């Protein structure tokens, strides 16, 4: 198996960000938690602060049909 442990990861439809946060903990990935519900992004931000990983995880509000990222 080949595991990706560095680089960037995008968790689309993240909800509270729990999976993406665990991925960040288990790797050196920079993780973006992406959801279209403002309240979920607020939960993500609270969870990111709780694990003190603001330097590697960010939460972004947006529409999956119009991703605000470079290819």
Image (spheres, helix red, strand yellow):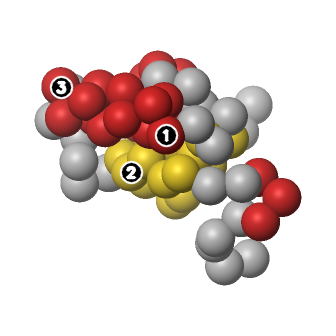
Which residue matches tag 2?
A: 58
Indicate which label's residue lies in the foreground, 2 or 1: 1
Residue 34: percent from left, percent from top: 58, 45
> Mark 3 to mark 1: distance in Å?
19 Å
Where, by quadrant of the figure, is residue 51 drawn? top left
Q: Give me the disc on residue 56.
A: none
Indicate which label's residue lies in the foreground, 3 or 1: 1
Of mark 2 and mark 1, the one earlier in the sequence is 1
Where, by quadrant of the figure, is residue 8 drawn? bottom right
Seen in the picture, residue 19 relative to 56 is either above or below; the reply is above
Which residue matches tag 3?
A: 50
Q: Residues within 10 Å of mark 3 (few under 14, many from 20)?
A: few
Q: Residue at x 36, y 47 (%)?
A: 57
Of mark 3 and mark 2, the one earlier in the sequence is 3
Q: Is residue 23 visible?
A: no
Which is nearer the eye, 12 or 27?
A: 12
> Mark 3 to mark 2: distance in Å?
13 Å
Q: Residue at x 48, y 30 (%)?
A: 40
Which is nearer the eye, 55 or 1?
A: 55
Quadrant location, the N terminus: top right
Where, by quadrant of the figure, is residue 41 drawn? top left
Q: Residue furthest right?
A: 65
Left or right of 2? Residue 26 is left
Q: Is residue 56 visible?
A: yes
Residue 32: percent from left, percent from top: 50, 50
Residue 66: percent from left, percent from top: 77, 66
Which residue matches tag 1?
A: 38
Which is nearer the eye, 66 or 71?
A: 66
Seen in the picture, residue 64 relative to 41 is either above or below; the reply is below
Q: Secondary structure at mark 3?
A: helix
């Amino acid at each position: 198996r080949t595991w990706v442990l560095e680089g960037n990861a995008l968790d689309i439809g993240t909800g509270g960000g729990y999976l993406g946060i665990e991925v960040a903990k288990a790797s050196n990935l920079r993780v973006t938690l992406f959801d279209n519900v403002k309240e979920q992004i607020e939960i993500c931000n609270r969870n990111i602060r709780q694990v003190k990983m603001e330097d590697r995880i960010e939460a972004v509000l947006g529409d999956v049909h119009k991703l605000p990222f470079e290819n």
